């Protein structure tokens, strides 16, 4: 009875998600092969928005920059690739981004 109160079906899903998330984040830190994504704000005269400085990527590999509002559903923003180990993404104007706060990540495709 106590177990059914503490671990409702939604709670089980959340527990599994958080455990898996922490496992893969820890694995990424241990391997040290995750690209670094740094957010930069562009404040031009007419155009304003954000772009990303991307470091420690593998040359000639395709990556996707994704955004999410809830860390569950991720939407592709752009695919990027380079012949170097560092690059900058295209500029994303404020109108093209979600209206609320959001999270960003880069993944290898």
Image (cartoon, rainbow, N blue to C red):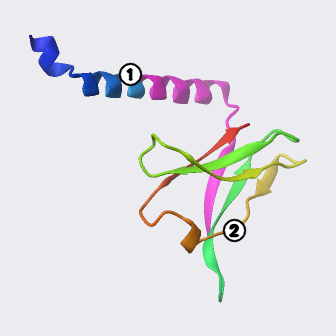
Nearer to us in this view, 33 or 4: 4
Label whose residue precedes the other's in the sequence (1 or 2): 1
Q: Which mark is residue 16?
A: 1
| 20 within the magenta span | yes
State which quadrant residue 33 falls in.
top right
Q: Viewed as shown, does residue 89 lie left or right of 46?
A: right
Residue placed farthest to the left in the image?
A: 1
Residue for badge 2: 91
Q: Number of labelled discs?
A: 2
Establish if 99 lies above or below 5: below
Q: Residue at x 67, y 59 (%)?
A: 52
Q: Residue at x 41, y 63 (%)?
A: 100
Q: CA distance from mark 1 to mark 2?
A: 36 Å
- Assess disc 2: are there few (<14), some (14-19) or many (≥20) residues with their C-alpha within 10 Å of its C-alpha: some
Indicate yes or no whether the magenta region holds residue 103.
no
Which residues, given as a range, are shown in magenta? Answer: 19-42
């Amino acid at each position: 009875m106590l177990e059914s109160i503490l671990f409702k079906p939604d709670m089980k899903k959340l527990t599994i998600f958080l455990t898996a998330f922490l496992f893969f984040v820890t694995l990424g830190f241990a391997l040290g092969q995750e690209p670094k994504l740094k957010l930069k704000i562009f404040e031009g005269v007419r155009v304003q928005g954000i772009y990303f400085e991307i470091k420690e990527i593998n040359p000639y590999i395709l990556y996707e920059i994704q955004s999410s509002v809830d860390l569950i559903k991720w939407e592709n923003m752009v695919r990027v690739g380079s012949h170097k180990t560092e690059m900058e993404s295209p500029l994303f104007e404020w109108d093209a981004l979600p209206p609320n706060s959001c999270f960003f990540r880069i993944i290898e495709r």
